[in-house]
Amino acid sequence: MFLSGKRALVTGSTSGIGLAIARAIRAEGADVVLSGFGEAGAIAALCEELGATHVSADLTLTEGVERMMAESGRVDVLVNNAGMQHVAPVEDFPVPKWDAIIALNLSSAFHTARLAVPQMKSAGWGRIINIASAHSLTASPFKAAYVAAKHGIAGLTKVLALELAEHNITANCISPGYVWTPLVENQIPDTMAARGLTREQVMRDVFLAKQPTKKFVAVEEVAAMAVFLCGDAAQNINGANMSIDGGWTAE
Ligand code: NAD
């Protein structure tokens, strides 16, 4: 329970990777603030399970991020996880999708960080964990906005690491390969259309083709890395990009 007395905000924690991180951080004793969309009853059940509070805000909007940060109170562990994807050839990529993905997957992490850092500095301790992606290190076709945003968040992480190092605050990213969550499942129809493939071909020839293990990463593996990055053993891991991709980016 090494995070007892700490307070953690995990964005996009009503689903997938963010929910697994919220559960794992809570299991180490932190008070957790959940964020993200979902059905009211399901969110209430999660709050009950985790003894957590929930802030509902659209993080594609700067005002949404600002309201979430105001309602969250003190944040010792900031996990920028909320994200979305859209798959389309560049010439057909909808401009509103580009804007929304850059806003959510990249700009929201800048806004949460700028708002959390003053209080982390005065507390003399903090952890910023950005959930990037294998796509922060490498590219795939038809994912212009996502790949640009994820490369961007890897760069932002390095800047935060350099600026905050002397304040006992670390900033790192975790870069999973394909993790079986709604975000991946929802890409199947558009990927089938963009590449002219069947569902089975998308799973085998697009998703798992990238991962030498031929297996999806589990959300719990990403959560375990986030918990490790919060600990004293990770105090000198700063500005790193921790790949959990079965070897994808080793190529
Ligand atoms: P998910 O779709 O299961 O969860 C996304 C979360 O973000 C949900 O809680 C959702 O409500 C929230 N969200 C979406 N739009 C939002 C908005 N406008 N404002 C506030 N919250 C919003 O996705 P996931 O697979 O768990 O992805 C989480 C993160 O992990 C993302 O940043 C994603 O890019 C990254 N990632 C996922 C994979 C993967 O294979 N699943 C791989 C690498 C990186």
Image: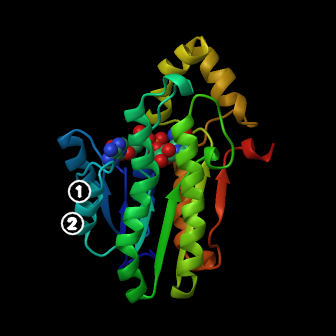
What residue does disc 2 label? 71
- In which quadrant of this rendering is ligand 1 seen? top left
Graded by Cα atoms within 10 Å as few (under 14), some (14 to 19) or many (20 or more), the crowding at tag 1 reads: some
Left or right of residue 131, residue 207 in this image: right
Left or right of residue 54, residue 163 in this image: right
Q: Secondary structure at mark 2?
A: helix
149 up-or-down from 229: above or below: above
What residue does disc 1 label? 55
Residue at image x 42%, y 28%?
94
Q: Nearer the viewer, residue 89 or 121?
A: 89
Q: Amino acid at mark 2?
A: Glu
Residue at image x 39%, y 56%?
108
Tags 2 and 1 touching, CB below 8 Å = yes
139 up-or-down from 243: above or below: above
Q: Quarter of the image holding residue 100?
A: top left
Q: Earlier in the sequence, mark 2 or mark 1?
A: 1
| Residue 30 showing in the rendered view | no
- Percent of width and height locating residue 204: 66, 22
